[in-house]
Image (spheres, grey):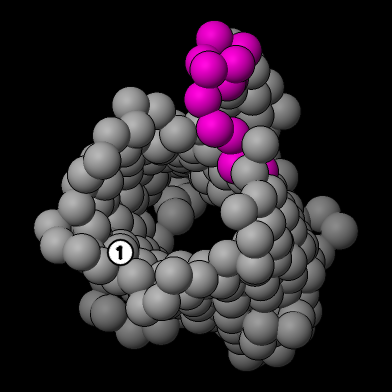
C-alpha cells in the first residue's frame, strides 16, 4: 500500500514543480464522514455477510491540491490530486469461516482513496459550465474482522467523468458530477487463511455534489455530498476458498476549506 501512495505523490510533486510557478494553485482540506453498506452474496444471490456504518462511525480527512492551467475567458483546465484517509468501525453481520451460527461483531476499517485528475471546464452560458475529464486512482480497504483475520482489498482505477457547475451568486456555486471508476489489478489478500485472490471485476458509479462559498478571492468554504454504488465480481478459487460477489452503497459528507495561491 505504501509504495502505491509514494508513486502518486511523486507524480504530484513533479507536476506541481513544473507548472505551479506560472499558475494558480488551490489547496484544500476537509473532514469526512462515511456511511457504508457493503454486502457479499453466494451464487444464488443470498446475502452471506455485510458491513454497515453511520457517518459518525467511519471518518477521517481529505487533502487536495489543484493547479489551474490554460485559463481563458470561457474555459480553463484543472490538474488535481486528492488523498482521502478514513478509519473506524462497521457492524459485521455474517458467520465465521466455514459457516456455523450467525455472528454480529465489530470490524475495524482503514481506507485510502487517492487519485490524480485532469478536468476541462467550458462556459455554456453566463452562469453554467460544462465539465469533463479523466483520472487515475488507487484504492485500498483494510478490513480487520479479528486480530488474526485481516483482509486487504486493493485496486487501481480509471476514472472518466462528466458534469456541470452552476454559479448561484458571485460567492456561491454548486456542481453535479458523474464519474465511472473501472478497477484493474484488483486483488484481495487474506491473513487467515493466508491466501491471495484476483477479483473478477470492480465497477463503481459515483454522483458527487460539491458546493463552494467564496469568502474572499483567496479563501473559500467547501462542502460535498458523494453517493457511490460499487460492484465486485467473484474472484478465482484458491485452495478451496474464494472471494464472493459483493455490492457496496456508500455515502460521504465532506466539509472543509480551500486556499488559492
Q: Is residue 214 left or right of residue 3?
A: left
- Using the image, determine if residue 200 lies above or below residue 48: above
Where residue 205 sits in the image (x, y, percent)?
29, 63
- Residue nearer the viewer, 92 or 155: 155
Which quarter of the rendered picture does the N terminus lie within?
Answer: top right
Mark 1: few/some/many CA within 10 Å (<14, 14-19, 20+):
many
Dot 1: element: strand
**Residue at image point 21% right, 44% down:** 74
**Residue at image point 50% right, 71% down:** 171
Q: Is residue 70 left or right of residue 107?
A: left
Residue 169 in sight from this viewpoint: yes
Where residue 219 sits in the image (x, y, percent)?
68, 57
Q: Quadrant of residue 10?
A: top right
Q: How many marks?
A: 1
Name the residue tied to disc 1: 165
**Residue at image point 63% right, 44% down:** 260
**Residue at image point 56% right, 71% down:** 213
- Residue nearer the viewer, 133 or 142: 133
Amino acid at each position: 500500500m505504501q509504495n502505491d501512495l509514494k508513486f502518486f505523490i511523486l507524480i504530484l510533486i513533479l507536476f506541481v514543480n513544473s507548472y505551479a510557478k506560472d499558475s494558480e494553485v488551490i489547496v484544500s482540506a476537509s473532514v469526512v464522514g462515511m456511511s457504508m453498506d457493503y454486502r457479499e452474496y453466494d451464487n444464488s444471490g443470498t446475502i452471506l455477510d455485510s458491513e454497515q456504518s453511520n457517518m459518525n462511525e467511519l471518518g477521517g480527512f481529505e487533502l487536495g491540491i489543484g493547479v489551474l492551467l490554460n485559463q481563458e475567458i470561457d474555459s480553463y483546465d484543472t490538474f488535481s490530486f486528492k488523498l482521502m484517509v478514513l478509519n473506524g468501525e462497521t457492524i459485521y453481520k455474517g458467520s465465521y469461516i466455514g459457516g456455523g451460527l450467525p455472528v454480529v461483531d465489530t470490524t475495524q476499517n482503514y481506507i485510502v482513496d487517492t487519485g490524480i485528475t485532469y478536468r476541462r471546464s467550458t462556459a455554456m452560458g453566463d452562469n453554467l459550465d460544462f465539465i469533463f475529464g479523466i483520472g487515475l486512482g488507487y484504492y485500498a480497504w483494510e478490513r480487520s474482522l479479528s486480530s488474526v483475520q485481516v483482509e486487504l482489498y486493493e485496486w487501481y482505477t480509471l476514472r472518466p467523468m462528466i458534469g456541470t457547475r452552476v454559479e448561484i451568486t458571485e460567492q456561491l456555486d454548486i456542481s453535479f458530477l458523474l464519474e465511472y471508476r473501472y478497477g484493474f489489478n484488483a486483488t484481495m489478500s487474506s491473513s487467515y487463511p493466508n491466501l491471495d485472490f484476483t477479483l473478477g471485476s470492480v465497477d463503481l458509479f459515483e454522483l458527487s455534489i460539491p458546493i463552494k462559498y467564496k469568502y474572499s478571492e483567496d479563501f473559500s468554504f467547501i462542502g460535498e455530498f458523494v453517493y457511490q454504488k460499487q460492484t465486485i465480481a467473484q474472484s478465482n478459487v484458491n485452495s478451496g476458498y474464494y472471494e464472493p460477489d459483493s455490492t457496496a452503497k456508500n455515502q460521504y459528507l465532506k466539509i472543509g476549506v480551500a486556499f488559492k495561491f
